[in-house]
Amino acid sequence: MNRRHFILGSAAAAATAALGVAWARWGEIHWVEFVEHDLPIPGLPQALAGRRVVQLSDLHIGPRVDDAFLIETFARVRALAPEIVVYTGDFVTWRGPDQLEQLARVMRHAPRGSRGTAAILGNHDYGFGWRQQEVADAITQRLGDIGIPVLSSTTISFDGLTIAGVDDLWGPRFGGHVPDAAIGSPSIVLCHNPDACDLDIWSNYRGWILSGHTHGGQVSLPLVGAPILPVRNTRYVAGAYELDAGRQLYINRALGHALQVRFGVRPEVTVHRLLAA
C-alpha cells in the first residue's frame, strides 16, 4: 500500500467512525420501534380478546432526553387508541425539583387507555441513591393528578383483567411479594427490574411479567451483544423470556435513555395484543 492509499483509507475509516458515533448519539436514540407482541392470558375475559396493552418504559424525563421526542412519540401512541396503557417505571432522571415540573409538562401529553391506565415506579423515581421516598411520593402525586395511578404492591382491574404492580427491587419499599389479587385470576404483573423474577416472591402466580430497566443495554455489538447491563442476571436483555413455573417475562428496551447513546438497540414502544390462553 502506497502512502496515498494509506491516507485515503485512514480518512475513510475515520469518516465512517465519525458517522457511527454521530448516529449512535443523535440518530438511533430517536428512531422508535413499535414492537407488536402477543400476550396470551389464561382465563382472559372474552371482551378483552384482541385488545391492546401498550407498554411504555423508562422515559427518563430530565436533562438528557428531549421533551419534544417524548411528546411526539406519545402522540403516535394516542393515535393507536389503545385499550390499556401501562408504564413500567423510571419516569425521570432525578437531578432536583425541576424534574417534577418537567414531568408535569411532558406527561400532560401522555397516552392513556380507553379502558384503563396503570404505572409502577423504577429505581430512578426514588431520587438520589434510590432512597428518597419523598421524591417517589411527589412523582406518584403528579401522575395521579393526570389520571395515571401508580401501583405499589397493589392491583387495579380493567374489565376483569387484574394489573398488579411490584415495588422496585432497588427501592426502599420493595415488599418481596406479589399482590394476592394477581394469583389465580387473569392478570399481568408490572415489575421494573427483571432481576426480581429470580427471587422467591411469586407464590403461585402464573402469567406475564412486564419489565423495563435494562434499556436493552443501549449498545449491542456484533458477536458480543450488550456489553453493559444493569442486572445481575445478564440473560435479561430485551424481549420475551420463558421463566419457571408457568411465568413469562417481557422486557421493553425503553423509550428514553440514561446516557445519550444507542447503537443496535432502538428505543421501543411495545404493543401487546391480548389473547385467551
Image (cartoon, rainbow, N blue to C red):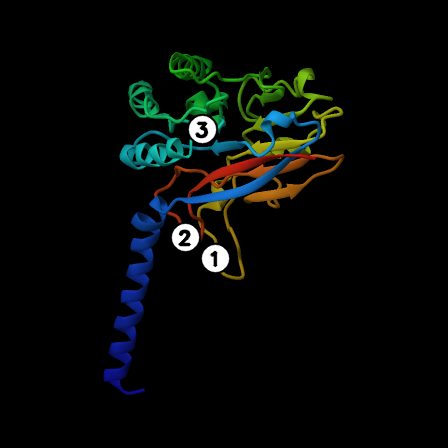
* Residue 75 to residue 36: above or below: above
Crowd rating for badge 2 (residues with CA inside 10 Å; few <14, some 14–19, many 20+): some
Residue type marked 1: Leu
Marks 1 & 3, CB-CB < 8 Å contact: no
Q: Secondary structure at mark 2?
A: loop
Marks 1 & 2, CB-CB < 8 Å contact: yes
What numbered label is drawn on residue 263? 2
Locate residue 228, reporting x and y percent: 50, 46
Quarter of the figure with residue 108: top left
Residue type marked 2: Phe
* Residue 238 to residue 177: above or below: below
Which residue shows up at 45% across the image and 41% down it?
Answer: 268
Reading the image, the residue beneath label 3 is: 90
Reading the image, the residue beneath label 1 is: 221
Residue 275 appears in the figure:
yes
Residue closer to the observer: 272 or 256: 272
Which residue of the protein is positioned furthest toward the bottom in this rendering?
2
Quarter of the figure with residue 10: bottom left
Locate residue 179, reporting x and y percent: 66, 17
Q: Secondary structure at mark 3?
A: loop
